Amino acid sequence: MNRPLRAALADKPKLVLVESPSNPLLRVVDIAKICHLAREVGAVSVVDNTFLSPALQNPLALGADLVLHSCTKYLNGHSDVVAGVVIAKDPDVVTELAWWANNIGVTGGAFDSYLLLRGLRTLVPRMELAQRNAQAIVKYLQTQPLVKKLYHPSLPENQGHEIAARQQKGYGAMLSFELDGDEQTLRRFLGGLSLFTLAESLGEWKV
């Protein structure tokens, strides 16, 4: 990570954006190290924490300047809100962001905010259950001969496993895998699913 990152930082970027764990391969990076290196060149560090939520990772405590969440996902937890949030460490930045949000109209509606607050009240137990479900699925997939590659931060072979154990409060509920087969194999697999469905989002209470 160090060489490509330092090469990118040599160009003096204004902002460094991190997604950890990443979508879709669940790669985990050292947020504290990246934020420190970004600060050295005067860049703002931004971490997308959607895949873990505040229940499992606190990027501000790891040195991030800004944290992003797609509130549509785990924070809401019911797939009935489209929303996002930017969280800042610096109170002056919070004030500036609030001013801009108010002036350009990107503020959430009252009912959307109510629905999001409802979801936040159950965030921690939902994340705990979702993690347990994910671990059960990972264990099952490890026994399947057609699963060529499996990606989840709990796996020692997953990129950043040791970092995840250190900087996260849990390994999260998102996983991905590759099937060893042709298109017909994939179609049969998708057609045989009963608990899972093709969807554009994640983090609903049913999972």
Image: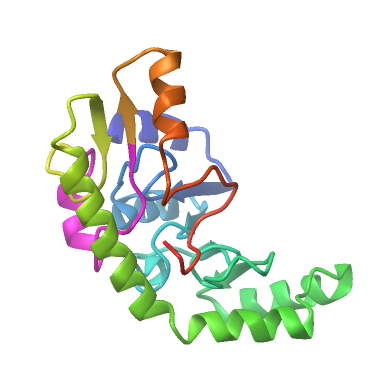
- Find residue 94 and report its horizontal and vertical position in percent: 63, 77
Residue at left 45%, top 65%? 206
What is the magenta range?
Answer: 158-176
In-front residue for pair 129/88: 129
Residue at left 51%, top 72%? 75
Please indicate whether residue 162 sits to the left or right of residue 129 in the image.
left
- Find residue 87 and report its horizontal and vertical position in percent: 56, 72
In-front residue for pair 19/202: 202
- Find residue 58 and report its horizontal and vertical position in percent: 36, 70
Decide: is 129 above or below 3: below
In-front residue for pair 81/194: 194
Magenta region includes residue 174: yes
Total marks placed = 0
Decide: is 62 above or below 125: above
Residue at left 31%, top 29%? 3
In-front residue for pair 169/16: 169
Residue at left 64%, top 81%? 115
Res 56 seen here: no
Decide: is 49 above or below 8: below
Please indicate whether residue 138 sits to the left or right of residue 178 in the image.
left
> Which quarter of the figure has residue 32?
bottom left
Q: Which colour scheme is used?
A: rainbow
Q: In the rendered view of the protein, which quadrant contains the N terminus?
A: top left
Q: Furthest residue to the top?
A: 182
Q: In the rendered view of the protein, which quadrant contains the C terminus?
A: bottom left
Res 194 seen here: yes
- Find residue 34 and report its horizontal and vertical position in percent: 36, 49
